[in-house]
Amino acid sequence: PSGSGGEMGVIRQELNKKRNHRSVRKLLKEAGLAIQQMKPVFLMSPLSVAQFIPPGSLMFDLVIIDEASQVKPEDALGAIARAKQIVMAFPQTSRHFSCRSLTLPLELISAFWLCRLPACRGRE
């Protein structure tokens, strides 16, 4: 990305500041696409995705949830909603899956995670 206006203008303005920087959430809302073009890989916890990336502002081609058995479905929902494709990696010792990682269409993942929500646990 180049230029001095638009999203790049926001980034350049922030880079030139010594103090009073925008919050991460505000910066990603105002210049998220330019940031994503410069740095296409974000390493964040599912809760950080929900906290710092406003809904509808960015989409990801791929979201990888490592140690998925340790992540509550409700905590991962924000990351899942921003993904075109999801890879969930489970430890080999997981009782629920025998494979190390699993790639499924969003519809199947949503069904899996919905079944793990507290309201559904009594039906298992």
Image (cartoon, rainbow, N blue to C red):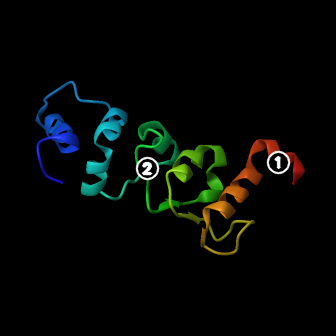
Q: Amino acid at mark 2?
A: Met
Question: Which disc, if any, is residue 44?
Answer: 2
On-image quarter of the N terminus: bottom left
Question: Which residue, as the protein is rendered here, is positioned at the far bottom?
Answer: 99
Q: Quadrant of residue 118?
A: top right
Q: CA distance from mark 1 to mark 2?
A: 28 Å
Q: Quadrant of residue 119?
A: top right
Residue 7 located left or right of residue 18: right
Q: Residues within 10 Å of mark 1 (few under 14, many from 20)?
A: few
Question: Which residue, as the protein is rendered here, is positioned at the far right?
Answer: 123
**What residue is shown at x 16% (from left), y 40% (from top)?**
9
**What residue is shown at x 61% (from left), y 51% (from top)?**
71
**What residue is shown at x 27% (from left), y 56% (from top)?**
37
Q: Amino acid at mark 1?
A: Arg
Residue 41 location (% of width, % of height): 35, 58
Does residue 72 lie above or below 90 as drawn? above
Residue 100 located left or right of residue 124: left
Proximity of marks 1 and 2: CB atoms separated by less than 8 Å = no
On-image quarter of the C terminus: bottom right
**What residue is shown at x 67% (from left), y 56% (from top)?**
110
Does residue 120 lie above or below 52 as drawn? below
Can you identify the residue that label 1 sits on? 121
